[in-house]
Image: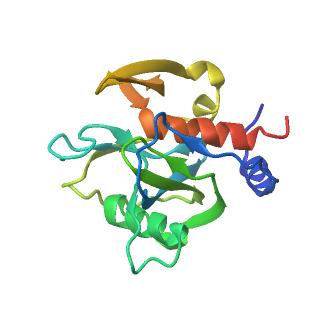
Amino acid sequence: MQLTVEWLRHRCSAERPQIVVHEAPVATGSPVAAAVLIPIVNRPSGLTVLLTQRTAHLRDHAGQVCFPGGCCEPVDVSAVATALRESHEEVGIAPDQVEILANLPDYFTSTGYRITPVVGLVTPPLNLHLDDFEVAEVFEPPLEFLLDPASYHQHALERDGTIHQYWAVPWQGRFIWGATAGMLVTLRQCLFAQD
């Protein structure tokens, strides 16, 4: 199947099943609102997804692969505003380069976050400016690879006596896992919900 911008726009505008996605078990208490941008880059060679690798010195999620994003701030009028602000701060994607296609179902993490994934089509050229404190590097796997069910493997991890199931996607020596991989699974489910 040829993944095109037109196909992506059509699929993102279609009715999606109402699903709630979370890691098991979900943290108790009120979750912290956050949002991430799933930046799908329209490259001449095909659609890619821009991911970041966090720096090793961070207190939370050091060295992990993630989407640009973060906690909602009082200045943010919506999850989209949070995703665009954080993406600009972390990697330098200009908000006017992003065509918002859809919000995916909120993703509830075992660490107490309610993350709204915002799907955006990004038009190059990208004049990226990485936040050296938070972002070690960025990379762009092909969207086609990330939508292939064969790319995903389920793993289990014991933490504090509880078994946590999570998805993982190895790609060129990198390990995309946890909430990031879970949101990519949700993206795939939503895009192919009509099939």
Q: Is residue 37 visible?
A: no
The residue sitting at 41% across, 68% down in the picture is 72
Q: Is residue 51 visible?
A: yes
Residue 44 placed where, x, y %? 61, 46
Residue 188 placed where, x, y %? 66, 37
The residue sitting at 50% across, 79% down in the picture is 77
The residue sitting at 57% across, 50% down in the picture is 40
Asked whether 135 or 77 is in front, the reply is 77
Instruction: Give the color scheme: rainbow, by chain, secondary structure or one colour.
Output: rainbow
Residue farthest to the left, as pictured: 57
Residue 94 placed where, x, y %? 45, 69
Instruction: In the rendered view, tell whether residue 157 sits above or below residue 104.
Output: above
Please give left or right for residue 156 compared with residue 5 in the image.
left
Callout count: 0
Instruction: In the rendered view, tell whether residue 149 sits above or below residue 26.
Output: above
Asked whether 19 or 143 is in front, the reply is 19
The quadrant of the picture occupied by the C terminus is top right
Asked whether 104 or 49 is in front, the reply is 104
The residue sitting at 32% across, 23% down in the picture is 161
The quadrant of the picture occupied by the N terminus is top right
Instruction: In the rendered view, tell whether residue 6 sits above or below residue 171.
Output: below
Asked whether 140 or 23 is in front, the reply is 23
